[in-house]
Image (cartoon, rainbow, N blue to C red):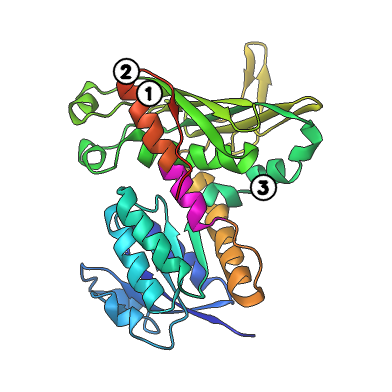
Amino acid sequence: MQKISIGIIGFGRIGNVHLQNLLRNNRYTVKYVCDIKPIGDFNKKYPEITYVQDYHEILQDQEVDAVLIGTPTNLHPEMIMEAAKAEKHILCEKPIGFDLHAIMDAYHEVQQHDIIFQLGFNRRFDDDFLNIRNQIKKIGKPQILKITSRDPEVPPIEYVKNSGGIFMDMAIHDFDMARYMFGEVEEVYVNGATLINPEISKYGDIDTAIISLKFENDSIGVIDNSRQAVYGYDQRVEVFGSEGMLHNTNHLNHNTTFSARQGVQLEKPMYFFLERYKQSYATEMEYFADSILTNAPISCTITDGIMAVKIAQAAAESFVTGKAVSVKKDF
């Protein structure tokens, strides 16, 4: 079996998740892991993997077929450009970047090379959302989309300062999911507030939002975001149309239900994304391998990443202006 030789650039929390999935997948050989910080025991734990602190060493190795970019978002466009020039296939974590000009430079560079580029909107690869998308014709003409996405706790302020804001950091998953389910978004309107941690507002950010969407197919949608759901990680999608509805429920820590005189008690939802979307991260690696080895269609393209950023920028503008904002489609 042909194996894909891959290097991981960025070895934080998500980089380690990807490493474990790649090591369990017999379609990949992990040749490198790169991070600017040294990890003393890495070579003892993974003697077959070369740990480097300069990602150019990975790009210069002709035996490497692909790279997985999991560095801070502001570094993505430059690394995408360099990896494309080195003719490496690319799987890049979301979002594709913060600055649209830099993102477009990366887009044009990718277009010049015969490589696979897949963006890591991992929720596309979740079994629940895949099932909804695969059956969406059952609902007939799409009419209403509802997305609920609430984190279990507010992130640290140090994270908030560099996150790009709730629309670019958190809701961008939901913008991509909205396009995945109902197609192109035409207009965005936001009601937002800081209801959980007032300090967040010092950085021009919010922690609570209701986002209204108008789609090109005339359907409408609403996204409900909160940085703190005290009962756990709340992740639900509902698609409603002329012939019916499809929806998913939260994943629970276990499915045991206690019923008694006082009422019925269920377990809380899983705590955070690493538990809830554990399988989706493994599945997205299979799709990436399929595109490289069998020329299967790319499941989440660079264009998908750009459009999610444009919706996020329109949402940020709507929050500031208090007006509905059209989503720019030009490239």
Q: Tag 3, which secondary structure? A: helix
Q: Amino acid at mark 3?
A: Leu
- Span highlighted in magenta in the image: 300-309
User: Do we see residue 329 in this rendering?
Assistant: yes
Q: CA distance from mark 2 to mark 1?
A: 7 Å
Q: Nearer the viewer, residue 94 or 270?
A: 94
Q: Are marks 2 and 1 in contact (CB under 8 Å)?
A: yes
Give x and y (percent) for residue 30. Answer: 45, 78
Question: As displayed, is residue 188 above or below residue 95?
Answer: above
Q: CA distance from mark 3 to mark 2?
A: 33 Å
Reading the image, the residue beneath label 3 is: 130
Give x and y (percent) for residue 261. Answer: 67, 11
Q: Tag 2, which secondary structure? A: loop
Residue 287 relative to residue 115: left or right? right
Q: Sequence order check: which comes first, mark 1 or mark 3?
A: 3
Q: Quadrant of residue 228?
A: top left
Reading the image, the residue beneath label 2 is: 195
